[in-house]
Image (tube, rainbow, N blue to C red):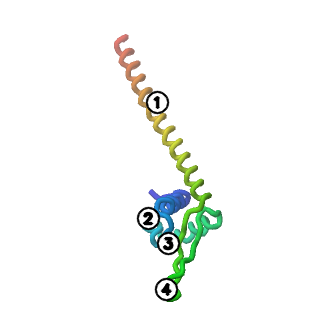
Amino acid sequence: MRRSKLEMHVDILKALACNGRLKPTHIMYKANIGCNILKQCLKLLLQQDLVKEQILHKKRDKTRVVYTITEKGLTALKNVWEIYNALQMTEETNTQNIVMLNRTQSITKQDFHLIK
């Protein structure tokens, strides 16, 4: 099953929240996202100020780009988890209600069978 763009953005935010600053390649592996899609996602996350880009200067005039999650990104990730947990609880509650309903229906069917 394919992931939505939202799920990919959340996976990137999770990778950065759990691992600190990461190079794009490491984000790709941790979030399981291809290079082109990662570029698109990072562009949107940067525009929304959910992720921050840092340029590190190495020896011999080499530069490395790393990304970190911002406070706004952490808040967004927290909100997503709260929604997920609320939906999960609702799903569990619905499952419990269905089980209870099935039990009630089976009892009713048994009772009805005894009445016949």
Look at mark 2 in the image and give the residue it sits on.
Answer: 30
C-alpha distance separating marks 3 and 2: 10 Å
C-alpha distance separating marks 1 and 4: 63 Å
The kind of secondary structure element at disc 2 is helix
C-alpha distance separating marks 1 and 2: 37 Å
**Amino acid at the residue labelled 1:** Asn
Q: Is the residue 105 above or below the residue 37 in the image? A: above
Residue 108 picture location, percent across and down: 41, 18
The first of marks 3 and 2 along the sequence is 3
The first of marks 4 and 2 along the sequence is 2
In this rendering, the label closer to the viewer, 1 or 3: 3
Look at mark 1 in the image and give the residue it sits on.
Answer: 97
Identify the image quadrant of the N terminus: bottom left
The first of marks 1 and 3 along the sequence is 3
**Amino acid at the residue labelled 4:** Lys
Look at mark 3 in the image and give the residue it sits on.
Answer: 24
Look at mark 4 in the image and give the residue it sits on.
Answer: 59
**Amino acid at the residue labelled 2:** Lys
Q: Nearer the viewer, residue 89 or 49?
A: 49
The first of marks 1 and 2 along the sequence is 2
